[in-house]
Structures are given as structure tokens and as C-alpha cells.
Amino acid sequence: MSSTLPGLLQLIDKVVSLPSVSSANKLLDMSNKPIIDYLANAFESMGFSCEIIPCNAEQTKFNLIATKGAGPGGLVLAGHTDTVPFDEALWSVDPFKLTEQNNKIFGLGITDMKSFFPIIMEAITPLLDENFKEPLIVLATADEESSMLGAKTLAELGRPKARSALIGEPTELQPVRAHKGIMMDSIRLLGESGHSSDPSLGKNALDAMHQVIAELISYRNQLKEKYSSELFAIPYPTLNLGAIHGGDNPNRICGHCELEFDVRLTPGMNIDTVREDIKKRVKQVTESLGINFKMEEIFSGVPAFFAEENSALLKAAEELTGHSGIAVQFGTEGPFLQELGMDTIVMGPGNIDQAHQPDEYMSLEMINPSIDVLRKLVSKNCL
């Protein structure tokens, strides 16, 4: 292991070693309790008061609110504790162990975004004996990658409260002032099976889905013409056809078919309106074919995010990093923290391009600058 910040790398290795996959697929989904317990113990040893908050009735998903200092104002440093699912056969290293190669560290969640918590610990260690005039709150959430359950739970509770909040998603330490919204849904078609030699013996759900897909592509083109925002590198909304499953044998009329898709929304778009538009279009297609359909939410959605117009935190981050605020395509928990009344931005170590894929990694060169910026932001906002 590198001689550079060996203690920090050991902490990162520890959080990576604690599996915390979240998934809409119940067979893949895991509890995040082990990493929440580990972080709570670690921050308590640093003088924080810690509260673990259940997010679901089964008590398998939890948030952590760790607080040092008291009173109004202060700063929240927030991150999610879960990772996406993975295919170990595609990894060249152990996903649950930090591996250092070529000035990079590899591991599941090492960029998105488990490393953020040990980096916070390293950043604030020299400040622990200072008088925290305003609170520093470290927030660790559940299920950002699947349902935003953790962030939604906090919004319902109305806490934590602070003046400002920074979400440490991987942005190469560039402050993010805007991102697109996102929603994910499935469309299930139910036809009638029958012998493939006579199409009149059934109703082919796969044929019907072909027409549904054509309608969705038409709708996607209309959205592209109607909405645009030059904030984003891809200035229009996207609708991605992500997965399709149907039928059971080539010599049977397909009796069922399911399509999963997502929509990335630009400013001015309403999630509920988009969802209703799609339902109407699917209904028009399927009614004429005598096919039943059901549309279900995979992920209810996150609206587009904008930092406050005169965000003090954005200005401070821009000054410290030398980067102007940017806009990104991916969604975050930002809108939920804004809902709590906090001046919110997104900024953290690592690159989103390395997330959600085998051999996920972070460049070691990102770590020291991140520590420096976080330490200065905590000093400015809390000391």
C-alpha cells in the first residue's frame, strides 16, 4: 500500500470491504447497516454525536447523522453509502478490497462514493481540537443508487438543518451548480400465447412492444424539439430504452413483454407530466391491439437541480478550486437537501466516468487537493 497517507488508504480499504449494494432487484439488494455502524463508530471516536435513522419498516436501510458542534448555521458534508450491483467476473481486482496500481486505487464504490467519508475524516482531523462555533454535520445516506430512500426519509423528517450542504459525488473537484432530473419506469404488456404457426391463435406482446417503442422514440424526438438548456453538454432531454424481456420460446406467440427505460429531464419538465404523457401514448397503442399494459415506477424520480442564484457555498468552492460551477447529466440527492432549506452544491473527488463499471478507480492525485478544499470549507463555515 502507498506510503502516501497510508492511514487514509486503510480507512478507504475498510469502507470498500463492507458490501452495501442497493438495487431494485431484491435478489441483489443488501442492507447498508455494516457501513453505517462503522462510520458511526469512527465519527464518535472523533468527538461527533451520532444518530442512526432507519429508513424502512424492515430496518435494513439506514442513514447516519454525525454532528460536531451545535447551534444554527454550519455545514453538511453528505454522501451515500451504497453502490450499484457488480459482475465480479468482469473485475481484474477484488471489488471489496482496495488495490493500488499505477497511481490509482481500485474498488467497488471507491469513486462513487465511499472514499468521500475517509477523506472527510482526514480533512477534519487537524481541526478537532478547535472550537466549532457552528456545527459540522456528516450525512451518510441509503439507497441513492436505486430509490433515493435515504434522502427522501430525511426530507420527510425535515432534518438535518444547516446553512449549507456539499454532496461529495465524483466531479473531479469541480463544483456542480446544476444537473438534470431523472425518472425510471417499466412498461409490461400482456398478450395471449399460442402456436406460432397461426398468428390468429394469440396476441403477440412483442409485436405490440415494437409499436410502443416506436411511439416512445417519437415522443423522445418531440421532447428534444420542445426542451433545451445550454447549461448541459447534452442540452436536450434523453429517453433511454435500457432493457427488454419477453416471451419464452421461438415457436410460441409471445404472451408477455417488459421494457425498462429512463428519462433525463431538463429544466421546465415535470416528472409527473412526462409519466402521464407516456401512459397515454402506450394506452393508445395497446387498446387498438387488445393488449393489456401496466406501467410501474422503478424510480419515482429526482427533479432537475440548480444551486441558489447567489450561492455563497458555490462562490467559496469556485475560489478554492479555481473552477467555475458546471452542469452535469447525472442526478444526485441535491434537490432533497435543498428542500430542507440548505444552500447546496455537488463537488467531490474522482470522476463519474469511472463509476458504475468494472475496475472502478480513483486517481491518487485527487486525494490531497480534496482534503485541502474540504478542510478550508469546514474552517470557513464552522470555526
Image: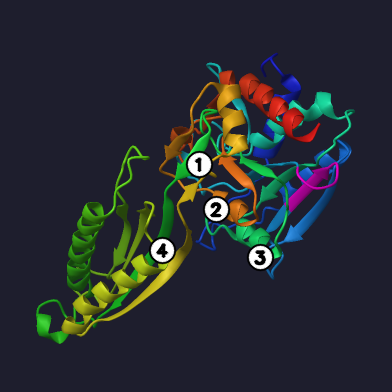
Q: Please, is residue 214 above or below residue 189 in the view? A: above
- The answer to whether the residue labelled 3 contacts the one labelled 1, judged by CB atoms less than 8 Å apart, is no
What is the C-alpha distance between the residues marked 4 and 2? 14 Å
Q: Which residue is mark 4?
A: 271
Q: Earlier in the sequence, mark 1 or mark 4?
A: 1
Residue type (three-letter) at the residue carrying disc 4: Ile
Residue 100 can be seen, yes or no = no
Measured as percent of width and height from the top left, residue 153 is found at 65, 62
Disc 3: which residue: 156
| Residues at marks 4 and 2 touching, judged by CB atoms closer than 8 Å | no
Reply above or below: 22 against 9.
below
Which residue is depicted at the point 24% across and 52% down? Answer: 224
Magenta-drawn segment: 64-73
Percent of width and height locating residue 313: 62, 36
Q: Residue furthest top?
A: 3
Assign a secondary structure to mark 4: helix
Q: Is residue 95 magenta?
A: no
Look at label 3 and name its amino acid. Glu
**39 relative to 56 in the view: left or right:** right
Q: Secondary structure at mark 1?
A: helix
Q: Which residue is mark 2?
A: 335
Residue type marked 1: Glu
First in residue order: circle 3 vs circle 1: 1
Residue 213 seen in this snapshot: yes
Q: Residues within 10 Å of mark 2 (few under 14, many from 20)?
A: many
CB atoms at circles 1 and 4 under 8 Å apart?
no
User: Which residue is under mark 1?
Assistant: 88
